[in-house]
Amino acid sequence: MPVAAHDRVAAPDRVAAVRAFNRFYTGRIGVLGEGLLRTPHSLTEARVLYELGQRDAIDVADLRRELAIDGGYLSRLLTRLEDQELVARERSPTDARRRRVRLTDAGAAASAELDRRSASEIGALLAGLGEEDEHRLVAAMDVIHDVLGDRPRPAGFVLRAPRPGDYGWIVHRHGVRYAEEHGWDESFEALVARIVADYVDGAYARREAAWIAEVDGEPVGCVLCVAKTDTVAQLRLLLVEPRARGRGVGTRLVDECLRFARRAGYEEIALWTNDVLHDARRLYERAGFELVESSPHHSFGHDLVGQTWSRRLGPGA
């Protein structure tokens, strides 16, 4: 049974890695100095000025929730900014018990200057990178935002044919996912590499196909439909990344594989899996596959039970 996220204890080396990154990044973007971006404002003050610069006014309680900081600390910080004539607090026009805060003209100018300096420094940072490294950096930051933030996951995905680099991605992600989720060793990754290499060699190019599922321009899943015999196709290497599960990606990949196999003239489609892959087996059952054979084997560093599933592809099937 999977361990609930709140019951996990993070590995010490991963904790150390995150802490090391935090130390590196805060130093790299210059937030450790006495004033942020060579201004008299601390990082928190600058963030308050930024948030206030995005609107005309906001209830103090809403600002505290948005920034997730202590109410007493925020009150003292606003008092300092008020003393500098950068912000003004006033009663809410809709509820006299609530206080609102807004930027003064001087505060708006300070907020704009902080925004200009921040954009300039980040622009200089990115300008020192090559195009590929810039893309990698922004993509990695987007992953951090997705993992740690509360942004709603995008609902849409697309299926497309593989592009250069995607076949390596298929091998890599199978190796990573099955090692992390099932403890399988590198012999499984080697098997995937051989399957991919055989497909790319294209012995049956007109009767074989592959698909990549993509969300926001990044691969999140894959499947191959290959020739097993002249009349039997084989579904291989179905994978859906954890962040894309629960959106129907796996179902869509399997359905696309079935449609292609019918159009290519196959009479039957088969697949081989293992009994420990519960989610995949449920997906195959829903797609009309039936279990036809099971046999124990020792592979990928584990004792497993291999399963062959099949379904007919004729009219009405």
Image (tube, rainbow, N blue to C red):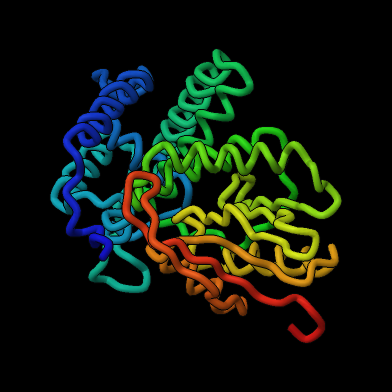
Which one is in front, 174 or 216? 174
Quadrant position of residue 4: bottom left
Where 140 sits versus 207, above or below? above
> Closest to the observer: 128 or 83?
128
Residue at the spot x=62%, y=72% of the render?
Answer: 310
Question: Is 266 left or right of 143, judged from the image as shown?
Answer: right
Q: Is residue 275 visible?
A: yes
In the picture, measured across the screen, residue 317 lies left or right of residue 81, that is: right
Residue for point 24% across, 44% down:
78
- Which of the pair 311/36 is nearer the observer? 311
Q: Quadrant of residue 82?
A: top left
Quadrant (top left, top right, bottom left, bottom right) of the C terminus: bottom right
Q: Is residue 310 left or right of residue 312?
A: left
How many dots with numbers?
A: 0
Q: Looking at the picture, how far across and down is residue 136, in whole percent?
A: 54, 29
Q: Position of residue 232 (x, y in %)?
A: 73, 64
Residue 145 % position (x, y):
42, 45
Q: Is residue 115 above or below residue 231?
A: above
Residue depicted at x 21% and y 41%: 77
Query: Residue farthest to the top?
Result: 128
Q: Residue at x 36, y 58 (%)?
A: 304
Residue 277 coordinates in the image, percent (x, y): 42, 63
In front: 51, or 154?
154
